[in-house]
Every structure is written in structure tokens, then in C-alpha cells.
Image: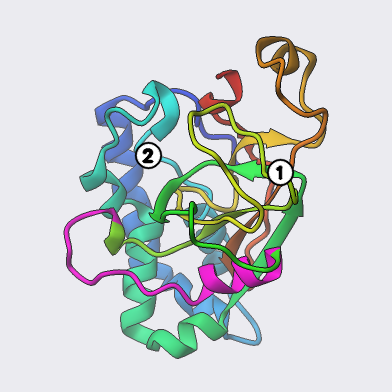
Amino acid sequence: MAAIKLNSSRQRSGAAGILLLALLAILVVVFRPWDAGSAQHVPIGAAAALQLVHEARVCGSPATDQYANVQESCLLASPVARWWREARAELGPAALTASMRVHIERRADYDGMAVRWGIGHTQPSVEACAHACLTHEPVPQSGHLDELPCNAFVWCAAEGGCWEPDIHKHSFGDCWLKFTEGPAAPEVNMRGELSQRQRSQHPDAPTEVQWHAGAVLPRGVELRNGSWSPRYEW
């Protein structure tokens, strides 16, 4: 299935977002795509629906206005959040975790909303950070972002600390657990070598990204290249 290019840098109109959300809800009900994680032979429709659910973005980009107006209710009702809740209810927590696969991209930073603050939450390796994301337990029925699962993570790999275009000090081992719409097509804050524009705008920035990032996806769902997040322009 070709990569689905949704507009992840601008907030979709309310009507278009509602229409897409309704369409994806129908796909979830009809194809029961959580079954694709453990089935030996997955129907083509279910596999395509599972990929679509994990690429969809209907709530816009949280970093558009520097996270000032995050739509929590929209994220809680988003296709991937609904998929996770229904798959967890159908399979049970242990079986759902076993059906997921960790993807790691070194020298990259993925955007998302923190479900576990990274400063002070240290892990010895990116693999350990990935495992922390995989096994993260949300707060049930809180009505807030901590009700969401972890499906993306970033880990500080530099012994002297990692650079970010923000006011925080990021130390070696900091492990940020995040929820994002479209984890199979992540919004990327940084990747590989920083651009000349970024280094010119931030003289203290390193040449190369100091973070490792990744996503937690059902088996059979491909991790796409994604797109730049608004944070890329900070």
C-alpha cells in the first residue's frame, strides 16, 4: 500500500476531520484490524485498514502553535486511540503488547504529546526506552492525555546531554514516552544532520541529531518516512 500523505503540518478543517474520523471508525468496525497483529494470514482489507488507522491524522499538529491549543478530546477520540482501546479490550493487555513491534530510528526526534515526562525518566539505552514505551500503562478513564498509550519515544543518546530548541536541559538517558496520531507516519522534529538553517538560527546546535527515536506499531504495519513537524521550523 502506498504511503498515505495526509496534511500533518496544518490543522485540518473541522468538517474534513470529522468525515475522516467517521470513515476510519467504519474501517475499524468492519475489518476489526486489531486481529491483524496476531493472525497468520491477514485479509488484505484488514491489513490496509490497520495501516490507514496508524497513518491517519485528524486533530492537526500539536506543535503548530507551540502546544498552546492541543485538542485533548480530539486526540482521545482519534482513530489510533480508538483502535488501541478496542484492541486492548478484545485481546487483553498482555496479548496486545505481544502483538506490537518496536521500530527504532537512530539520530532522529519524533514529535508527540508526552504521556511520561522525559526529564528525570532515564533509561540506559534506546532499547530500554522502547521497552518502557511498549509496556507503559496509561491512567484509565482519566479524560486527559495520560489516558493515552505510548506509541512513540525519544531517547537522549549524547553523554553530555542533547540539544533541543527549547528551554529545558536534556540529559543523557532521558526517555520521553509520547502519544502521537499517525505513529506509522511520524511527524519528525529532526533527522540525521541538522540543516544549515537550523544551525544558523541556533548557534549552539550540534551538527548531528543527538536523539534516537522510534514508534510502537502492530506487527504488519510499516513505519513510513513521515513528514517534518512544525517544530522543525523552530
Question: Viewer-proximal residue, 225 or 48?
Answer: 225
At mark 1, the secondary structure is strand
Q: x, y (%) of residue 45?
A: 54, 65
The residue most toward the front is 160
129 part of magenta stretch: yes
**Residue 3 visible in the shown view:** no
Residue name at image x 65 percent, y 35 percent: 163
Residue name at image x 70 percent, y 21 percent: 204
User: What amino acid is at disc 2?
Assistant: Val
Image quadrant holding the C terminus, namely top right
Magenta-drawn segment? 126-145
Question: Viewer-proximal residue, 38 or 2?
Answer: 38
Residue at the disc numbered 1: 108
User: What amino acid is at disc 1?
Assistant: Ala
Taking the image as shown, residue 147 lies to the left or right of residue 80, namely: left
Residue at the disc numbered 2: 58
